[in-house]
Image (tube, grey):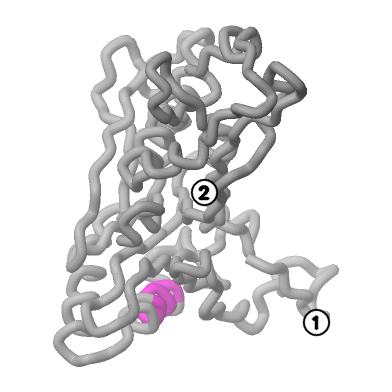
Amino acid sequence: MTLVIAAHSLPNERPGLWFAADSMISRERPVLCEYRKIYEVAVRVNAPNFRVHSIAAFDNVIYEQAIAVAFAGNLTTAHHILNQISDHLSRLIAYQDDAGNPTLSMECSFDSRRAFGTHFHPHEYPDFHSATSLLTASFIANVAQHAFNLAVQSGRRYKFNEDEIEHLIAQVVIGIRCPTAGTFHLYCLIPSFPAPGYFPDVRMEEIGPGKVVTIGTPNQEASTQACHDAAREGGKELGESLFSHLVALVDGNSIPTIGHPCVLKELTDKGLLARRTSGLQIGAGDANPNLKGKDHIPVRI
C-alpha cells in the first residue's frame, strides 16, 4: 500500500506544487522500503533535422521541461504506465499542416511517412519553434491520460475477470507547470469501475488550489484536507505541514502498510526538488538477523 499526498502551494508561498509520499512496498506485510513513488518526467518537443531536401530525423529538441508523476497501486502496472507516459511525453513532434500552420502531435499519431517524403528547399526550411505555443498543461495532461489508457488496455488480450483487473490497477497524480502560461496544474488519473468489458477507462480530474488529493491508502482525504486548511489558517508552510502529517501517520502505525522513509518534493519553475526525507526508524532491519546492529546505507528516493 502507498500514501501519496499532493496539493498546490498556498497563496502566500511561491507558486508550485507539493508532493509527499511514503516509500514502503508491502505484500500483506512490508517487503521493501526506500521505494521511489514520485518521479521527474521529461517533456520534450522534437523538430525535424534536415538533410539537403528532406527530413533526416525528428531529433532536434527545441523545448524541454520536467513534470512530476507520482503513483500508487500495483507496481508492475504503475511502472508500465510510467514508462508509457515518459515515452509519449519525450517524443512530441513539432511540424506543420498543409497550410503551413504549426502542429504538435504525439509520435504515435503523427504521419511520419508523409513527413519524410516531403521535399524542402535547403534555404527555406520551415521554423517549427512556433509549435511550442501549442504546448499547454491541458495538452500534456491529455497525452498522459492517453498513455495511461494504452498501458491499462494492453492487458485485454489476457481476458482477466473484473476482480483480477482491479488488483492490477494503479493511480497517478501529475503535476505540471504550463509552458505557455507559467501556471501550475495538478491532475489525478484514476481508472473507473465498474468497467464494461473488464477494462476501465481512465478518468482525469484537475485538482484546483485549496484542495488536497491523496491516492493509495483510502479514506485519508478528510484528515489531509484538515491539515492543509490548518496550515493555511495558521500561516504555516504547507509542504512541511503535509510532510509532518504523513510522518505522524507512519509513526502512529495507524496504517501498517505505509512506512519510512517519507519524502517531500516540490515542483517549481526549476523542476522537481527534494525538500525533506525522514529516516528509517531505529531497529528497522532487526527482523533480518543478517542486518541486526549494522549501519543502514540510505537509498536516494
Q: Is residue 3 magenta?
A: no
State the residue in front, 187 or 162: 187
Name the side, left or right, on which 7 lies relative to 283.
left
Give the magenta part as a residue range.
243-250
**SS type, badge 1:** loop
- Residue 224: x %, y % from top left: 25, 69
Badge 2 density bin: few <14, some 14–19, many ≥20, Cα 10 Å? few
What is the quadrant of the C terminus in the image? bottom right
Which residue type carries mark 1? Asp
Q: Residue furthest front?
A: 123
Would you name the residue on which mark 2 appears? 28
Would you name the residue on which mark 1 appears? 295
Above or below 51: residue 251? below
Which residue type carries mark 2? Glu
Q: Main secondary structure of the magenta part?
A: helix
State the residue in front, 119 or 121: 121
State the residue in front, 96 or 197: 96
Which residue lies at the image location 69% right of the left edge and 31% below the top edge?
49
CA distance separating discs 1 and 2: 27 Å
Badge 1 density bin: few <14, some 14–19, many ≥20, Cα 10 Å? few
Tell me which label, 1 or 2, sits earlier in the chain: 2
**Quadrant of residue 242 within the rendered picture:** bottom left
Q: Is residue 122 visible?
A: yes
- Residue 39: x %, y % from top left: 55, 55
